[in-house]
Amino acid sequence: MINDIEVIKTKSSKINEVDFDNLKFGSVFSDHMLVCDYKNGKWQAPKVMPYQGITLDPSAKIFHYGQSVFEGMKAYKDAEDNVWLFRPLDNCKRLNISSKRLAIPELPEDYFMEGLKALLEVDKDWIPKKDGSSLYIRPFVFASGEGFHASPADEYKFLICTAPSGSYFSGEVKVLIEEKYSRSANGGVGFAKAGGNYAGQFYPTQLAKEKGYQQVIWTDDNTHEYIEEAGAMNIFVRINDTLITGPTSDRILDGITRKSIIELAKAEGINVDVRKLRVDEVVEAAKNGSLKEMFGAGTAAVISPIAGFGYKGEDYDLPKMDDTYANFLKKRITDIQTNKAEDPFGWRYKL
Amino acid sequence: MINDIEVIKTKSSKINEVDFDNLKFGSVFSDHMLVCDYKNGKWQAPKVMPYQGITLDPSAKIFHYGQSVFEGMKAYKDAEDNVWLFRPLDNCKRLNISSKRLAIPELPEDYFMEGLKALLEVDKDWIPKKDGSSLYIRPFVFASGEGFHASPADEYKFLICTAPSGSYFSGEVKVLIEEKYSRSANGGVGFAKAGGNYAGQFYPTQLAKEKGYQQVIWTDDNTHEYIEEAGAMNIFVRINDTLITGPTSDRILDGITRKSIIELAKAEGINVDVRKLRVDEVVEAAKNGSLKEMFGAGTAAVISPIAGFGYKGEDYDLPKMDDTYANFLKKRITDIQTNKAEDPFGWRYKL
Ligand SMILES: Cc1ncc(COP(=O)(O)O)c(C=O)c1O
Ligand SMILES: Cc1ncc(COP(=O)(O)O)c(C=O)c1O
């Protein structure tokens, strides 16, 4: 059990340089970071220190073999300046699930939780209060051990950095249902938040952008007949009044937003169907008018409504509606996250 | 076209600390490295400088999104101290093929070739002369651009580092034919030398090691019925007197050793069959005695003979033979690489 976390404070805060009313997403970083090293077969004591560059040997395995995992979470400040996290233990657990698959040593839960608390305590002034803004939190682990040998490293670094952030997406999102490229294999690392999964998405996403879409809807790599994820989010499709999302698998990330939306929607009496979803079915529903909504779900964007999709050279628009599940559920979940509503699920975590 | 590459020499060479008679693989690094930065939309002039640590912001995308690719090649010194490379332009081309898939800007060919030559010129004393040893060369590119946003970076670093090395594997290699895990998806990044592909292999390989195997034979992610690669090598199987290897695909790396072996074997009158290879067929051949050899092929190990394999809980031993294709082809290819034999293919490249 970790008791006292050493804190080395910065001598010159950058907070006055930041325009908290016009924050982008994840591009301004707070004054401090948490750092914890794995060496000699164990995780050493985590430390809070000034946000600063990391120096690595050119043979550090992160540069060569992609041994890295990460998490994404948010801290919110309510009207009374209380600070709230959302299901943080689930992020900690998932980090370790990802680490295990990437042959990275798992991190003791209290190193994660106590480290996070110590960091947020020091940088609490960086947590934005404005509606829609939050402190984006990025825990990550990477291989710092050295050598040109494709085998797990013997040293790692766990860091938590934070970035006061505005909302993730802006504007209308049109998506392309992918027929050629894939993000993950059966028996692969798709269920892990492994760095390499994201780099693999960039090129197909660039191609989609050139065609006028903002995101790719990933399908299974074998048949491309089943819908799996939306960019780096889980996906929900509303057909008539039923909300459908695919089951998690070794190809799909078990999103915290996704599972919260499933619970929340059920509690609100919305019919939720967790099952494999064929592209055909979505196209058919678009044609006959039963397709009402599609949206991505993830920590960064919370819920990101989809305005239309392209598939096999055809474009399909979704109806413009006032009363959407997306808006309703987004408000419900953010109200819980930001302490504006009761939290019957016990998801909110007070710092 | 690059003309003069700036060279900043180290003030204190480490070469006298190195025991060139007892080199491991890829764990001692030469005095210098080549560094080339991509920024403001273009690759800047490459520079040779002392081997040294690289400092990056914690938000550099390499730590989060796995945007990295690499190559592996070798330099050999012959009896007259001439230095030889093996098909280096193919490594340069493949680096760019990998980069493209990972949304990394491609590198001008002369930056790669002239940079490599300038580096090897400065560190030529690091190229071992001993039989079986070589200077292992590691070109790599990674995302140094910053931001917690899953999109391609705007800055990159291309480096070449080198490591005087002994042989890669030692001892007998038993392999496990994988029935559950996979290294790549259809439409994925398996054909690229992307960092993330390697990290994904570590855990399944660890599990195989715990069962007493040294490597995993990767099968297709959909059925696990076809043999694809051997660890981080291409695979060859000899049934009777025919050498079989799978065709390259978007799941399989187009290995330079593999394609050289195919050409060489054909030129030597060996029957080579490039076709999909079922696991069943190999098991059947092992049972009826027609399976003579299996070996991995790649730059690091050149050819790595397999002594036996495990599949569905059964172990199969390969016959111990004196006259193997593996030994014959390994000698043929290394003789060409090290200028001990004629090179009718024009593969050797004099520095
Ligand atoms: C591939 C992928 N799918 C889904 C999600 C959503 O997960 P969460 O809701 O836990 O943020 C993420 C992360 O944001 C992701 O990277
Ligand atoms: C996955 C994989 N397959 C095959 C090979 C063999 O390629 P090459 O012969 O070009 O070294 C490599 C690299 O060594 C590899 O990483």
Image (tube, coloured by chain):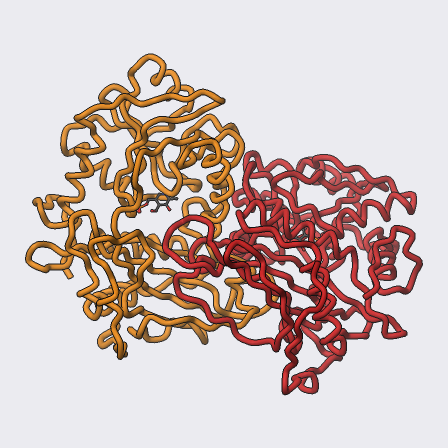
Chain colours: A orange, B red
**Residue found at the far top of this picture:** A288
**Residue found at the far left of this picture:** A80
In this rendering, would B309 be left or right of A195? right
Tell me where residue B340 appears, x and y as whole percent: 90, 64
Of A172 and B20, nearer the camera is A172
Residue A139 vertical placement versus A185 (above, below): below
Residue A55 vertical placement versus A193 (above, below): below
In this rendering, would A213 be left or right of B328? left
Residue B229 vertical placement versus B165 (above, below): above
Q: Quadrant of the N terminus of chain B?
A: bottom right
Q: Residue at x 38, y 36 (%)?
A: A230
Q: Residue at x 51, y 59 (%)?
A: B39
Tell me where residue B224 appears, x and y as whole percent: 58, 38
Q: Is residue A312 visible?
A: yes
In this rendering, would A261 be left or right of A183? left
Of B67 and A252, nearer the camera is B67
